[in-house]
Image (cartoon, rainbow, N blue to C red):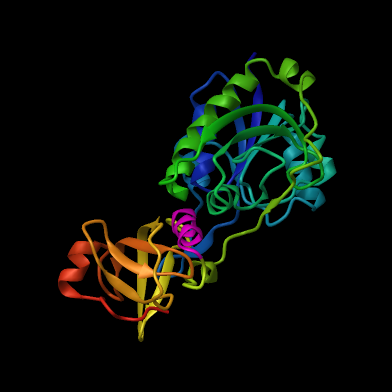
Amino acid sequence: MALKVIFAGTPDFATYPLRALLNSEHQVVAVFTQPDRPAGRGNKLTASPVKLLAQQYHIPVHQPFSLKQAEDQALIQQYQADVMVVVAYGLLLPAAVLNMPRYGCLNIHGSLLPRWRGAAPIARAIEAGDKQTGVDIMRMDEGLDTGDIVARAVLPILASDTQQQVHDSLAPMGAELLLNVLSDLPRFLQQARPQPSEGVCYAHKLSKAEGKIDWQQPAEVLARKVHAFSPWPGSFCHWGEQILKIGAAHALNDQTTAQPGRVLGITEDGILVATAEGVLCLEQLQRTGGKMLAAKAFSQGCDLTGQQLS
Protein backbone atom coordinates (compact mmCIF):
# COMPACT_ATOMS: atom_id res chain seq x y z
CA MET A 1 0.00 0.00 0.00
CA ALA A 2 1.64 3.20 -1.19
CA LEU A 3 1.19 6.08 1.24
CA LYS A 4 1.35 9.86 0.92
CA VAL A 5 3.96 10.94 3.48
CA ILE A 6 4.92 14.28 4.99
CA PHE A 7 8.45 14.04 6.42
CA ALA A 8 9.70 16.28 9.23
CA GLY A 9 13.34 16.12 10.35
CA THR A 10 16.55 18.09 10.50
CA PRO A 11 19.94 16.41 11.22
CA ASP A 12 21.93 13.70 9.45
CA PHE A 13 20.17 10.96 11.48
CA ALA A 14 16.91 11.92 9.76
CA THR A 15 18.33 11.64 6.24
CA TYR A 16 18.45 7.84 6.45
CA PRO A 17 14.68 7.28 6.75
CA LEU A 18 14.00 10.12 4.32
CA ARG A 19 16.25 8.55 1.69
CA ALA A 20 14.59 5.18 2.29
CA LEU A 21 11.17 6.75 1.72
CA LEU A 22 12.32 8.53 -1.42
CA ASN A 23 13.50 5.23 -2.86
CA SER A 24 10.34 3.33 -1.86
CA GLU A 25 6.84 2.98 -3.27
CA HIS A 26 5.61 5.72 -0.94
CA GLN A 27 5.23 9.32 -2.05
CA VAL A 28 6.95 12.04 -0.01
CA VAL A 29 4.68 15.00 -0.73
CA ALA A 30 6.49 17.57 1.44
CA VAL A 31 9.41 17.96 3.82
CA PHE A 32 9.46 20.14 6.94
CA THR A 33 12.80 21.03 8.52
CA GLN A 34 14.34 23.66 10.79
CA PRO A 35 15.12 27.09 9.33
CA ASP A 36 18.65 27.57 7.99
CA ARG A 37 21.08 28.37 10.82
CA PRO A 38 24.48 30.11 10.98
CA ALA A 39 27.28 27.55 11.01
CA GLY A 40 31.03 27.28 10.54
CA ARG A 41 33.71 29.91 11.05
CA GLY A 42 31.97 32.35 8.75
CA ASN A 43 28.61 31.88 10.46
CA LYS A 44 26.99 31.48 7.05
CA LEU A 45 23.37 30.41 6.89
CA THR A 46 23.47 26.66 6.34
CA ALA A 47 20.69 24.33 5.22
CA SER A 48 19.96 21.21 7.25
CA PRO A 49 21.02 17.79 5.88
CA VAL A 50 17.32 16.94 5.43
CA LYS A 51 16.69 20.07 3.36
CA LEU A 52 19.67 19.37 1.11
CA LEU A 53 18.48 15.81 0.48
CA ALA A 54 14.90 16.91 -0.23
CA GLN A 55 16.12 19.50 -2.73
CA GLN A 56 18.04 16.82 -4.63
CA TYR A 57 14.73 15.04 -5.20
CA HIS A 58 12.81 18.29 -5.90
CA ILE A 59 10.50 17.76 -2.91
CA PRO A 60 8.73 20.89 -1.57
CA VAL A 61 10.55 22.09 1.58
CA HIS A 62 8.96 24.17 4.34
CA GLN A 63 10.87 25.74 7.25
CA PRO A 64 8.46 27.34 9.71
CA PHE A 65 9.76 28.58 13.06
CA SER A 66 6.73 27.02 14.74
CA LEU A 67 3.74 24.84 13.89
CA LYS A 68 1.43 26.74 16.21
CA GLN A 69 0.28 29.29 13.64
CA ALA A 70 -2.90 28.64 11.67
CA GLU A 71 -1.17 29.26 8.32
CA ASP A 72 1.51 26.65 9.08
CA GLN A 73 -1.10 24.11 10.11
CA ALA A 74 -3.11 24.86 6.98
CA LEU A 75 0.04 24.13 4.97
CA ILE A 76 0.22 20.65 6.44
CA GLN A 77 -3.51 20.10 5.99
CA GLN A 78 -3.41 20.92 2.28
CA TYR A 79 -1.20 17.90 1.53
CA GLN A 80 -3.88 15.44 2.74
CA ALA A 81 -1.15 13.03 3.86
CA ASP A 82 -1.76 9.49 5.02
CA VAL A 83 0.98 9.77 7.65
CA MET A 84 3.58 12.24 8.91
CA VAL A 85 6.99 10.79 9.78
CA VAL A 86 8.97 12.83 12.32
CA VAL A 87 12.67 12.24 13.01
CA ALA A 88 14.68 14.65 15.22
CA TYR A 89 12.69 17.56 13.81
CA GLY A 90 13.23 19.96 16.71
CA LEU A 91 9.71 21.41 16.89
CA LEU A 92 6.78 20.28 19.00
CA LEU A 93 3.72 19.18 17.05
CA PRO A 94 0.44 20.64 18.37
CA ALA A 95 -2.57 18.34 18.78
CA ALA A 96 -4.16 19.78 15.64
CA VAL A 97 -1.17 18.67 13.56
CA LEU A 98 -0.94 15.25 15.23
CA ASN A 99 -4.48 14.49 14.11
CA MET A 100 -4.27 15.80 10.54
CA PRO A 101 -2.80 12.80 8.68
CA ARG A 102 -5.08 9.82 8.11
CA TYR A 103 -2.94 7.54 10.29
CA GLY A 104 -1.50 10.22 12.55
CA CYS A 105 2.19 10.99 13.11
CA LEU A 106 5.00 8.48 13.60
CA ASN A 107 8.26 9.30 15.33
CA ILE A 108 11.58 7.44 14.97
CA HIS A 109 13.49 7.73 18.25
CA GLY A 110 17.01 6.47 18.96
CA SER A 111 16.45 4.70 22.28
CA LEU A 112 14.43 1.96 23.96
CA LEU A 113 11.60 3.99 25.43
CA PRO A 114 10.73 5.06 28.06
CA ARG A 115 14.48 5.18 28.73
CA TRP A 116 16.10 8.30 27.28
CA ARG A 117 13.22 10.41 26.14
CA GLY A 118 14.43 13.76 24.88
CA ALA A 119 17.10 15.36 22.74
CA ALA A 120 20.29 13.29 23.13
CA PRO A 121 19.37 9.63 23.66
CA ILE A 122 22.43 8.09 21.98
CA ALA A 123 25.00 10.07 23.94
CA ARG A 124 23.18 9.65 27.26
CA ALA A 125 22.91 5.88 26.83
CA ILE A 126 26.68 5.59 26.29
CA GLU A 127 27.46 8.01 29.11
CA ALA A 128 25.31 5.98 31.51
CA GLY A 129 27.02 2.72 30.57
CA ASP A 130 23.91 1.13 29.05
CA LYS A 131 24.59 -2.27 27.51
CA GLN A 132 22.02 -1.81 24.77
CA THR A 133 19.99 0.79 22.95
CA GLY A 134 17.88 0.70 19.83
CA VAL A 135 15.24 2.38 17.70
CA ASP A 136 11.58 2.78 18.61
CA ILE A 137 8.85 3.89 16.26
CA MET A 138 5.96 5.39 18.18
CA ARG A 139 2.64 6.96 17.35
CA MET A 140 3.05 10.50 18.57
CA ASP A 141 0.88 12.13 21.19
CA GLU A 142 1.17 15.54 22.86
CA GLY A 143 3.80 14.42 25.38
CA LEU A 144 7.57 14.39 24.93
CA ASP A 145 8.34 10.95 23.46
CA THR A 146 5.43 9.40 25.37
CA GLY A 147 3.49 7.80 22.50
CA ASP A 148 2.58 4.13 22.07
CA ILE A 149 5.35 1.90 20.70
CA VAL A 150 4.59 0.65 17.20
CA ALA A 151 7.85 -1.23 16.48
CA ARG A 152 11.33 -1.72 17.96
CA ALA A 153 14.84 -2.80 16.94
CA VAL A 154 17.58 -3.44 19.55
CA LEU A 155 21.32 -2.72 19.27
CA PRO A 156 24.03 -3.81 21.76
CA ILE A 157 26.41 -1.05 22.90
CA LEU A 158 30.05 -2.14 22.94
CA ALA A 159 32.47 -0.71 25.52
CA SER A 160 34.44 0.95 22.71
CA ASP A 161 31.44 2.47 20.90
CA THR A 162 31.33 6.23 20.38
CA GLN A 163 28.28 8.40 19.83
CA GLN A 164 29.12 8.50 16.11
CA GLN A 165 29.43 4.73 15.81
CA VAL A 166 26.11 4.06 17.54
CA HIS A 167 24.47 6.80 15.46
CA ASP A 168 25.77 5.19 12.26
CA SER A 169 24.29 1.84 13.32
CA LEU A 170 20.93 3.12 14.54
CA ALA A 171 20.15 5.44 11.61
CA PRO A 172 19.87 2.72 8.93
CA MET A 173 18.10 0.45 11.44
CA GLY A 174 15.46 3.13 11.89
CA ALA A 175 15.04 3.52 8.14
CA GLU A 176 14.56 -0.21 7.64
CA LEU A 177 12.14 -0.44 10.56
CA LEU A 178 10.09 2.45 9.17
CA LEU A 179 9.60 0.80 5.79
CA ASN A 180 8.57 -2.40 7.53
CA VAL A 181 5.95 -0.51 9.57
CA LEU A 182 4.61 1.40 6.56
CA SER A 183 4.23 -1.83 4.58
CA ASP A 184 1.30 -2.75 6.85
CA LEU A 185 0.64 0.40 8.87
CA PRO A 186 -2.95 -0.34 10.04
CA ARG A 187 -1.84 -3.68 11.53
CA PHE A 188 1.17 -2.15 13.30
CA LEU A 189 -0.95 0.66 14.73
CA GLN A 190 -3.52 -1.82 15.97
CA GLN A 191 -0.80 -3.75 17.82
CA ALA A 192 0.87 -0.63 19.31
CA ARG A 193 1.49 -0.86 23.05
CA PRO A 194 1.73 1.87 25.70
CA GLN A 195 5.12 2.65 27.17
CA PRO A 196 5.82 1.28 30.66
CA SER A 197 5.41 3.79 33.46
CA GLU A 198 8.62 2.56 35.11
CA GLY A 199 12.13 3.37 33.93
CA VAL A 200 11.42 6.82 32.53
CA CYS A 201 14.47 9.07 32.17
CA TYR A 202 15.34 12.09 30.07
CA ALA A 203 18.23 12.62 27.68
CA HIS A 204 18.94 16.30 28.20
CA LYS A 205 20.48 18.26 25.33
CA LEU A 206 24.28 18.16 25.21
CA SER A 207 26.27 21.29 26.03
CA LYS A 208 29.84 22.20 25.13
CA ALA A 209 30.72 22.67 28.81
CA GLU A 210 30.05 18.97 29.47
CA GLY A 211 33.12 18.08 27.43
CA LYS A 212 35.44 19.41 30.16
CA ILE A 213 37.11 16.44 31.86
CA ASP A 214 36.87 16.39 35.64
CA TRP A 215 39.80 14.31 36.88
CA GLN A 216 38.06 13.94 40.25
CA GLN A 217 35.71 11.43 38.61
CA PRO A 218 36.52 7.70 38.19
CA ALA A 219 38.38 6.63 35.05
CA GLU A 220 35.47 4.42 33.97
CA VAL A 221 33.07 7.37 34.06
CA LEU A 222 35.49 9.57 32.13
CA ALA A 223 36.04 6.94 29.44
CA ARG A 224 32.30 6.66 28.90
CA LYS A 225 32.02 10.44 28.58
CA VAL A 226 34.80 10.55 25.98
CA HIS A 227 32.93 7.95 23.94
CA ALA A 228 29.53 9.57 24.49
CA PHE A 229 30.70 13.05 23.48
CA SER A 230 32.50 12.00 20.28
CA PRO A 231 32.22 13.78 17.91
CA TRP A 232 30.23 16.51 19.72
CA PRO A 233 30.71 18.30 22.04
CA GLY A 234 34.07 16.54 22.28
CA SER A 235 36.20 16.05 25.40
CA PHE A 236 38.98 18.36 26.57
CA CYS A 237 41.15 19.36 29.49
CA HIS A 238 43.67 22.10 30.25
CA TRP A 239 47.46 21.86 30.35
CA GLY A 240 48.52 25.22 31.64
CA GLU A 241 47.16 27.76 29.18
CA GLN A 242 46.64 25.18 26.46
CA ILE A 243 43.53 23.18 25.71
CA LEU A 244 44.06 19.49 25.01
CA LYS A 245 41.31 17.75 23.09
CA ILE A 246 40.90 14.04 23.83
CA GLY A 247 39.88 12.03 20.77
CA ALA A 248 39.76 8.57 22.35
CA ALA A 249 40.45 7.01 25.75
CA HIS A 250 39.83 3.92 27.85
CA ALA A 251 39.87 3.14 31.57
CA LEU A 252 42.43 0.98 33.36
CA ASN A 253 41.92 -0.70 36.72
CA ASP A 254 45.43 0.33 37.80
CA GLN A 255 45.43 2.06 41.18
CA THR A 256 47.56 5.08 41.98
CA THR A 257 48.04 7.52 44.83
CA ALA A 258 48.97 10.32 42.43
CA GLN A 259 46.91 13.49 42.34
CA PRO A 260 43.99 13.24 39.89
CA GLY A 261 45.07 14.81 36.60
CA ARG A 262 48.75 13.88 37.03
CA VAL A 263 50.31 12.33 33.91
CA LEU A 264 51.93 9.09 35.01
CA GLY A 265 53.70 8.16 31.78
CA ILE A 266 53.18 6.65 28.35
CA THR A 267 52.76 3.07 27.17
CA GLU A 268 52.10 1.47 23.80
CA ASP A 269 48.39 2.03 24.43
CA GLY A 270 48.50 5.70 25.32
CA ILE A 271 49.23 8.42 27.88
CA LEU A 272 48.28 7.44 31.44
CA VAL A 273 46.57 9.96 33.69
CA ALA A 274 45.56 9.51 37.32
CA THR A 275 41.91 9.95 38.23
CA ALA A 276 39.97 9.78 41.49
CA GLU A 277 39.59 6.04 40.89
CA GLY A 278 41.75 4.18 38.40
CA VAL A 279 43.79 5.45 35.46
CA LEU A 280 42.55 6.94 32.19
CA CYS A 281 44.56 5.99 29.12
CA LEU A 282 44.44 8.77 26.51
CA GLU A 283 44.72 7.23 23.04
CA GLN A 284 44.39 10.37 20.88
CA LEU A 285 45.17 14.00 21.72
CA GLN A 286 45.22 17.37 20.01
CA ARG A 287 47.00 20.54 21.09
CA THR A 288 45.69 24.02 20.39
CA GLY A 289 46.29 24.70 16.71
CA GLY A 290 47.50 21.15 16.05
CA LYS A 291 46.09 17.94 14.61
CA MET A 292 44.52 15.02 16.44
CA LEU A 293 47.34 12.50 16.91
CA ALA A 294 47.79 9.04 18.34
CA ALA A 295 49.29 9.29 21.84
CA LYS A 296 52.70 7.98 20.76
CA ALA A 297 53.01 10.48 17.92
CA PHE A 298 51.73 13.26 20.19
CA SER A 299 54.37 12.42 22.81
CA GLN A 300 57.21 12.68 20.30
CA GLY A 301 56.60 16.40 20.12
CA CYS A 302 55.23 16.91 23.62
CA ASP A 303 56.15 14.74 26.60
CA LEU A 304 53.50 15.29 29.28
CA THR A 305 54.98 12.84 31.82
CA GLY A 306 54.81 14.35 35.29
CA GLN A 307 52.65 17.25 34.14
CA GLN A 308 49.42 18.21 35.86
CA LEU A 309 46.26 18.41 33.76
CA SER A 310 43.18 20.29 34.87
Image quarter hosting the C terminus? bottom left
- Taking the magenta stretch, the answer to whether it contains residue 226 is yes
Image quarter hosting the N terminus? top right
- Taking the magenta stretch, the answer to whether it contains residue 80 is no
Lateral position of residue 41 relative to residue 134, left or right = left
**In the image, residue 131 lies at what x, y percent?**
54, 40
**In the image, residue 166 lies at what x, y percent?**
47, 42
Residue depicted at x 48% and y 70% = 276
Q: Main secondary structure of the magenta part?
A: helix
Lateral position of residue 84 relative to residue 154, left or right = right
Q: Which one is nearer the viewer's eye here, 258 or 31?
A: 258
Residue depicted at x 76% and y 24% = 192
Q: How many marks?
A: 0
> Vertically, is 291 above or below 112?
below
Lateral position of residue 52 relative to residue 66, left or right = left
> Vertically, is 11 above or below 44?
above
> Among all residues in the image, which is located at the extreme left?
300
Quadrant of res 273 = bottom left
Residue depicted at x 53% and y 71% = 209
> Vertically, is 64 above or below 233?
above
Q: Which one is nearer the viewer's eye here, 141 or 1?
A: 141
Residue range in magenta is 218-228
